[in-house]
Image (cartoon, rainbow, N blue to C red):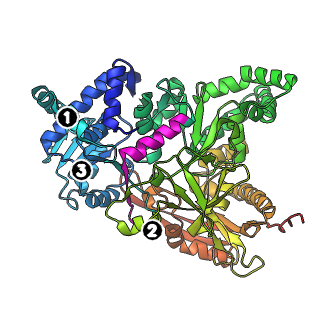
Amino acid sequence: MQTTFPRLMLKHAAERPTAPALREKEYGIWQATSWAALAHMVESIACGLHQAGLQRGEHLIVVGANRPRLYATMLAAQSLGAIPVPLYQDAAAAECVFPITNAEVRFAVVEDQEQVDKMLEVREQCPQLTHIYYDDPRGLRKYTEDGLGSLEELMAAGGVFAQQHPQFFKEEVEKASYTDVAAMFFTSGTTGNPKGVVHTHSSLIDRAEAGAEFDKLSNAEDVLAYMPPAWIGQNIFSYAQWLVCGYVVNCPESSATVTIDLKEIGPTYYFAPPRVFEGMLTSVMIRMEDAGSFKRKMFHHFMAVAKKVGPALMDGRSVGLFDRLQYALGNLVVYGPLRNNMGFSRVRVAYTAGEAIGPDLFTFYRSIGVNIKQLYGSTETAVFVCLQPDNEARADTVGVPCKGVEIKVAENGEILVKSPGLLKGYYKNPEATAEVLTPDGWYHTSDAGFIDSHGHLKIIDRVKDVGRIQGGANDGAMFAPKYVENKLKFFPHIKEVVAYGDQREKVCVMINIDFDAVGNWAERRNLPYAGYTDLAQKPEVYQLIKECVEKVNADLAEDTLLAGSQVSRFLVLHKELDADDGELTRTNKVRRGFIAEKYKPLVDGLYEGKSEQFIETVVKFEDGRTGSVSATLKMSDAKTFTPVKAAA
């Protein structure tokens, strides 16, 4: 489709002016914005920005949660030929400096007082940031800084300009070509400064269309937009595909109300990373453990039926009459109410991506009638590379190449992709662009994997992270840290894992417990604790985690390729890994190198065979203050297993 996002918006406004485009929950009530009202809002913001001096080809940053006016701002910028750059709303002020400087940003449109404060804080380092507009005025009445104003005022001025120049907006929209740059997304920057990924209208719209066609999406879908808009996954699902299909995007009241909002909206098309699905299942299991014995028995009986029959029904395979009747009864008394309680009563397609999902977790959702599937993609590929067909959803693959995508595997096992959705390049970084894009159009994903016999792609790990054990009984064995980390994270009691082993004689891991799940587990056993640090170091918790580690080792022993990656020693960290402390990226990916340096005494202690090690860590609180957490951490050995020999 050779079009642009503003043209798509105007098309919906012309064809379906009164249909809802966006809904926002305000003071507990859902307020709808029609396509016609959205077009009017976009025109007012665009005219206001034009008057303020925003130029074609210039960058404008947008910082905040999913809000109708922030979506309208992105469309307004694109209408003028400017380039919106969404940044993570939970990023610290210092993290905004590089993107603002790199993209030479003069204009910022932000959500509220918190984001205004960040922009004002970085102004000294970014003197070119002259215009800051905010959506929510609460707390900002007495702010008098130069260049600071409300979106309301900008729209009012833009509205007057639009009346005086009725053709201006449409003429500006018509100037754009589908090959023009539409947006820029900064990578999470796991190994250095983030890179600005440049995408055109063409690359984003093509991938949005491919995904919509694959899953037969229409304007009847309802989507809940609750992930950060700066993440390209959220942008594709609630911006690109929204404008391609014309469905309704629902913006939650706040991050605290997402669970309630999910139940109220009942989306038909849903996306969440595995940790969201894990959190939902953990809360269900916690509630079931606290339920009466009859309810518990009924739940476990029908879940056994669901596990046996549900995936087959979901895949359209034949099932015996008795099993079908049992499942129907289970749907009436357990699965239906459970889906409704989770907000999945209307879900037709649910996707997960970003990390591997546990087989048990995957089976659970498909068993109760939720069509959960996996996809594969990245910021550089505009998300859609591989998707799982409805009747071929499996926990160990990421699907088949979708429309327009070619995949090949390099000699070193790296996945290479050719697609119409590939980035135009990294902004002001031709060297990095040349590293990932070959002259003949192949993109280096940096992921190691292979195509299985069914044509599905399987991902093992990042190519650079796949290492070798050196010395000891497993000398030369392959070590895939992410694979090991993900297998451990499949357990509900484990939230985060960092694995080490490359060029070492054994594998050691540092673990974060899931505080809610382990806390509930401890309470049911009358085990007192005084907070995360205390609970994490309980001998009973160590035994619980040890059992998880040893189950993973038993699984790895049966994998001839990765049997040498079994975990020899582990510890449970005294604090949760946090993006504010630099230990995770804003998309919650582990910064393994940074953590190794920060916790060097712990890593050394694991490899030196120590039984405990004192550590003191500086932490950053949400209000910007710093403090410290100290503890003497226990270090424990785990049983490893003799690799199972492959059959001759």
Residue 140 figure quarter: top left
Q: Amino acid at mark 2?
A: Glu
Which residues, given as a range, are shown in magenta?
193-213
Residue where numbered disc 3 is placed: 57
Residue 13 figure quarter: top left
Residue furthest to the right? 648
Q: Secondary structure at mark 3?
A: loop
Q: Earlier in the sequence, mark 2 or mark 1?
A: 1
Is residue 195 in the magenta section? yes
User: Could one spot residue 526 in this view of the protein?
Assistant: no
User: Could one spot residue 99 in this view of the protein?
Assistant: yes
Q: Amino acid at mark 3?
A: Gly
Instruction: Locate residue 392 relative to residue 577 in the image: left or right.
Output: right
Rendered position, 511 above or below 273: below
Q: Secondary structure at mark 2?
A: helix
Instruction: Locate residue 386 relative to residue 159 in the image: left or right.
Output: right
Check residue 634 in the rendering and tell me which mark sits there, or answer none: none
Check residue 435 in the rendering and tell me which mark sits there, or answer none: 2
